[in-house]
Image (cartoon, rainbow, N blue to C red):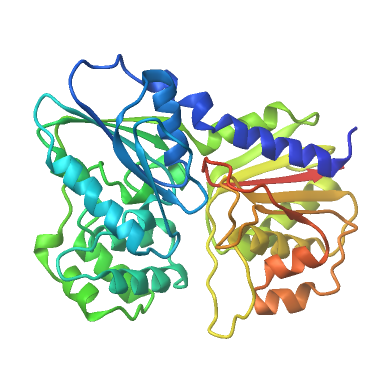
Amino acid sequence: MTAPRHVLREMFDAAVTAALPARTLAAHLPVKPAGRVVVVGAGKASAAMGAALEAAWGPCEGLIVTRYDHAVPCAGIEIVEAAHPVPDQAGADAARRILNLAQGLGEGDLMIALISGGGSSLLSLGAPGVSLTDKQMLNRVLLTSGASIDEMNCVRKHVSAIKGGRLAAAAYPARVLTLVISDVPGDDPSHIASGPTVPDATTLQQAREIVARYRMVLPDSVTAALNDDANETPKELSRAELRMIATPITSLRAGQAVCPLPCLILGDAIEGEAREVGRAMAGIALSVRQHGVPIAPPCVLLSGGETTVTLPADATGRGGRNVEFLMGLMDGLDGAPGIHAIACDTDGVDGAAEVAGALIGPDSDRTRLQAAMQAYDGHGFFAGIDAQVITGPTLTNVNDFRAILIE
């Protein structure tokens, strides 16, 4: 068999390729209408989605906001870059312009919304009274709270002028077609980029309960917005259609298809504290090696989803959920022979670092593992043992890809 780490990297690359907009988007487009079409978008893959749309339809009118260094040239659509995961002025300005475009449409017009993961931070336009500075503080609190992505998005929607279905509501009576690349467990479109064109089932009361549950200390304006009934999100939207063009399970199956070994997909929506999920996966891998349960070796265990990392106040390192997962996995395996693994974010960015993740094996140096876990310094640890996976921006985003190969 090819070297285990080579097999794992090929599987990850196949998973990313299967989710590229250039491969998936055109098949989901309707016949190009004769009337006015305006394209808007937000997310790490949104510019690549815009380029794929123009490859099928020719130059289009519109505006897309994507993460810095994720721009793809388009013939007609304007591409703006902004900050992620903490919003900046460029993102706020782009969000305002996108909302204005939607508000200027009429009954015979079509708005196409290109939405992918990361759009929530990029479409940062606060509810009345909530400034960009307050939104930035909110995002920092959410990212270190330990809340799940669904919980974070629930709060974000209720302090936004554009999320939680408000963008589609602003475009009415125009038709709205949303094309989505899913980066969330369960593929619920209302959670992807906080669902700017999707009816929202969550409520202000739920948002307030999440804030209380995680003891979040928020700016006064955010607290006021969460207590204002006017900030409840739309529960119904007319003339709005949505099509999912790429999902985590599709990418897991693409990785499975190129693997020379039997693969067991454990799930595409696994959540939980990253290093604890890693320790649990170590237990499953050891069961495979020792008992052939739930699958006999040699084999690969595949999983996806979006874990969380709860940072203590004294954390000093650089990390992300994939490297946290791998440190937990290494800790649980304790050098067990014949077990290799990869964990990477399919967008090429794990946490806030320009690193997708890492590869490990039984020979990986564990000397500094406990110190790195104490400091939450996964990127520093894996850089130190030359195990990082660095792809640059992949221009798609279908969440995390994790594969454990047991010889």
On screen, residue 41 above or below 324 = above
Pick whichever, 154 or 62, lies toward us. Answer: 62
The answer to whether residue 310 is left or right of residue 256 is left
Name the spot of residue 9 as percent of width and height, x first: 75, 41
Rendered-image quadrant of the C terminus: top right
Q: Quadrant of residue 92?
A: bottom left
Query: Residue 56 location in percent, x, y?
Result: 41, 19
Q: Nearer the viewer, residue 36 or 338?
A: 36
Residue 384: which quarter of the image?
bottom right
Quarter-of-image position of residue 294 = top right
Residue at the spot 41% in from the left edge and 47% down from the top edge: 43
**Residue 305 placed where, x, y %?**
54, 48
Q: Please provide percent x and percent y for residue 181.
A: 44, 37
Q: Is residue 165 visible?
A: no
* Residue drawn at x 25%, y 42% as measured from the top left: 197
In front here: 268 or 178? 178
Q: Is 200 drawn above or below residue 277 in the view shown?
A: above
Task: Indicate the quadrant containing the N terminus: top left, top right, bottom left or bottom right.
Answer: top right
Residue 321 vertical placement versus 338 (above, below): below
Give the residue drawn at x 82%, y 44%. Answer: 5
Left or right side of 77 for 226: left
Q: Left or right of 121: which side holds 164?
A: left
